[in-house]
Image: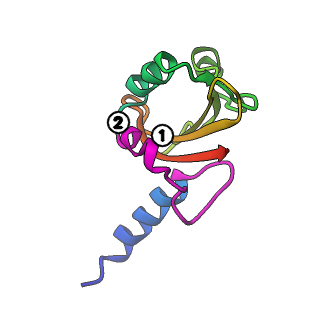
Amino acid sequence: MTPPRHVAAHWAAIVSLLWIGECSLSLPVLAEDYARLKERPYDVVRGELIDESWKPASPGCMSTLTYYCDVYPELEDCAATGVAPCIFWWEDESGALKLKIYTVGEIKRMISGIETVGE
């Protein structure tokens, strides 16, 4: 059964808002070691990363939501509309491995994807 046109258009708009910055139609590569982080509240995982000696590694906050830039030094960008997708960067102690974390949700920011960069 094909969904009504307005429903299909609605979902297409949501999917297009999920990826900001470097847009991709495919899901980010999810490292098995970090699968435990996906679909969890970002603020909880953020605390765990800090406890595990990960450091904020944003290439520079590009968000127009400057409040979030001050609160989250690891923030790259956040959309102020739709499902409020954001991108956060973390690096390990050596700086050789980085995590690029995608989130959705404004009030309860949930991790929607993770990419590893390096190593």
Q: Is residue 28 magenta?
A: yes
Count of labels shown? 2
The foreground one among 119 and 100 is 119
**Image disc number at residue 9:** none
The foreground one among 26 and 14 is 26
Q: Is residue 53 above or below residue 10?
A: above
Q: Name the image quarter holding the N terminus.
A: bottom left
Q: What color scheme is it?
A: rainbow
- 2 or 1: tag closer to the N-terminus: 2
How far apart marks 2 and 1 lie (CA) works out to 9 Å
**Image disc number at residue 40:** 2
Specify the amino acid type for callout 2. Answer: Arg
Position of residue 15 measured from the top left corner of the image (x, y, whole percent): 48, 59
Q: Residue at x 38, y 76 (%)?
A: 5
Image quarter for residue 68?
top right
Residue found farthest to the right:
60
Magenta span? 18-39
Of the two numbered discs 2 and 1 in the rendering, the one whose residue sits closer to the viewer: 2
Q: Is residue 6 above or below residue 71?
A: below
Position of residue 71 measured from the top left corner of the image (x, y, whole percent): 57, 15
Question: Mark 1 Cα within 10 Å, few/some/many (few <14, many 20+)?
Answer: many
Residue found farthest to the bottom:
1
Specify the amino acid type for callout 1. Answer: Thr
Image quarter for residue 86?
top right
Q: Residue at x 67, y 44 (%)?
A: 119
Q: Mark 1 points at which residue?
A: 103
